[in-house]
Image (cartoon, helix red, strand yellow):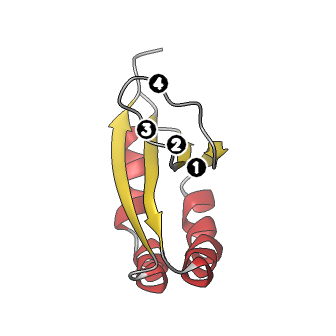
Amino acid sequence: MNKGYWIVAYRSISDQAKVKAYAELARPPIDAAGGRALVFNARPEVQEAGVQQLTVVIEFPSIEAAREAYASPAYAASLVALGDGAERDFRIVEGLPQ
């Protein structure tokens, strides 16, 4: 079973308080799905056409777990708290076979 990943780049943050509220609410459903943060970097080294953005990578035990965590009611509540506090590029991707 291949691992799943959330890869999130914050294009802009307009309300830090909303981002903080989101983070507090998002952690329990991520943890419940077996997710763990691999990357939280506000100043990534960008190359080629890269953009300097807060980048977050969360690893899950499977792509199914990553999808289920995103679709969970608890995570949906965190998105309500985030609201218009940030614009993000959010991707769920499947890892390579191990």
Q: Position of residue 83 (x, y in %)?
A: 40, 83
* CB atoms of marks 3 and 1 within 8 Å: no
SS type, badge 3 = strand
Q: Which mark is residue 60?
A: 2
Q: Is residue 45 above or below residue 41?
A: above
* Disc 4: which residue: 47
What amino acid is found at the position of numbered circle 2 in the picture? Phe
- Vertically, is 2 above or below 19? above
Residue plotted at (51% across, 44% down): 52
Q: Which residue lies at the image location 53% right of the left edge and 46% below the top edge?
A: 55
Could you tell me how far apart the alpha carbons at marks 1 and 4 are, in whole angstroms? Answer: 28 Å
Asked which quadrant contains residue 19, the reply is: bottom right
Residue sitting nearer the eye, 75 or 49: 49
Query: Who is closer to the viewer here, 52 or 71?
Result: 52
Quarter of the rendering occupied by the N terminus: top left
Q: Amino acid at mark 4?
A: Gln
* Residue at point 63%, 43% (across, down): 43
Instruction: Report the Cα–Cα distance between label 3 and label 1.
Output: 9 Å
Q: CA distance from mark 1 to mark 2?
A: 4 Å
Circle 3 residue: 4
**Considering the numbered disc 2 on the image, is that residue within a helix, a strand or a loop?**
strand
Q: Report whether 43 appears left or right of 68.
A: right
Eye-nearest disc, 2 or 4 = 4
Q: Are marks 1 and 4 in contact (CB under 8 Å)?
A: no
Q: Nearer the viewer, mark 1 or mark 4?
A: 4
